Amino acid sequence: MSHPTTPEEVAAEALRLENADDLEGAQRQLELGVASHENSGGLWHNLGLIRSRNGDPEGAIEAYSRAIELGYPSHVNRGVNYELLQLGAEAVSDYLAALAKEPDNLDALIDLGTLYVSQGEVESAERLLSRAAALDEKANWQLADAYSLKGDPASARESLLRAIAAGESRAYLDLAELTANSHDSSLAEDYFLEAIRAGAVLARRQYAEYLDEIGKVDRGIEVALEGIRLGDGSCFQPLAVMLEETGDLPGALANYRLAVADGDSELQEEVIRLESSMTRDD
C-alpha cells in the first residue's frame, strides 16, 4: 500500500484506522497529515475529532481552532470540548458563532439548549430546543428537559412521547423516570421495560434502583443480575446495595468490589466501610 500523500488520502487512511479501532494510529496519521498540509482545514478538524476521542480535549480545541482559522466550520465541535473542560462561556460563544452562520444548525441548537438547561436558563433553553424539535422531532427528547426545569411535567411528557414516536428510543428512560416521579409505579415499570427493550444505556441499572425504591427488592435483584449476565457492569452497584439491605453482606461486598474493578472507584469507600463492619461483627 502506497503512503498517503494528498489530504483526501490522509483522511481516508485515518478513517480506516479509526474503523479498525486503532485510534492512536489514526491520530498519528492525522498529525503527520497536518504537518504536510498545514492549510487543510478538514485535516485539522479530523485531528480535533480523534484527539477528542482519545481523551485530549485541550488538544482537540487546539486543532479545531486552527481549522476555524482556515475557514472550516468547527465551532460546534470546539464548543463540545470547551464544555468537557467546564468552560461554559467559551462553549456558548462557539455555539452562537455556529448559529450566526447557520441558524438551523441542529447540533448547535441542541448543544446550546442543553447547556442552557444545565445552567438553569430555562427560557433560552426552551426557545432553542423548540427550534431544534421543529427541525427534527427526535429533539423533543432534549426539549423535555427544558419543560422539566420549567416545572411543566405535562409538556415534558408530551415531548418525550413525540420523541419516541419519531424513533428516539433514549426518551423511554426519561419517560420512565418522569412517570415514576408522578407515583404511577405500574406505568413507570412499563416504560422502564420499554427502555430496556430499546437498548437504552443504564436502563437496567435505573430500573433495578427504582424497584428497590418502591420496595420490590427481590425483583430489583433479579433485574440487576440479568444486567450483569448481559455484561452491564453498572448493575454491580445497585445489586450490592440491595444485597446489603437483605443482610447478604458477603454478597454485597463482592459486588462492591466488582463495581470498583469495573471502574467505579468511588465505591472503594463502600468496600472499606463494609469490610470494617464485617470485621467488627466477627
Image (cartoon, rainbow, N blue to C red):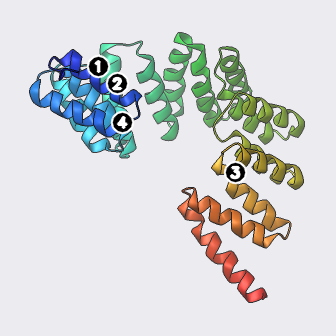
How far from the left and from the top, in percent, is residue 201?
63, 37
Q: Residues within 10 Å of mark 2 (few under 14, many from 20)?
A: some
* Left/right of residue 156 with respect to residue 74 in the rendered view: right
Residue at screen point 66% across, 77% down = 273
| Left or right relative to 222: residue 109 | left
Q: Which residue is disc 1 drawn over?
A: 12
Amino acid on which disc 1 is placed: Ala
**Where does label 3 land, which residue?**
235
Task: Evaluate whether residue 210 shows in this view.
Answer: yes
User: Gap in Å between the C-alphas at discs 2 and 1?
Assistant: 6 Å
Query: Which mark lies nearer to you, 4 or 3?
Result: 4
Cα gap from disc 2 to disc 4, whole angstroms: 9 Å
On residue 218, the disc is none
For the residues labelled 2 and 4, say whether their Cβ atoms are less than 8 Å apart.
no
Left or right: 144 as drawn, with respect to 238: left
- Answer with mark 1 or mark 4, whichever residue precedes in sequence: 1
- SS at mark 1? helix
Q: Which numbered tag is attached to residue 22? A: 4
Say whether residue 78 is visible. Answer: no
Q: Residues within 10 Å of mark 3 (few under 14, many from 20)?
A: many
Q: Which quarter of the figure is the N terminus placed in?
A: top left
Looking at marks 3 and 2 on the same chain, the residue that comes earlier in the sequence is marked by 2
Q: Quadrant of residue 45?
A: top left
- Left or right for 279, reference 101: right
In whole angstroms, how far apart are the C-alphas of marks 4 and 3? Answer: 29 Å
Q: Please tell me which residue is depicted at 71% across the width and 29% down the height of the picture.
A: 172
Cα–Cα gap, marks 3 and 2: 34 Å
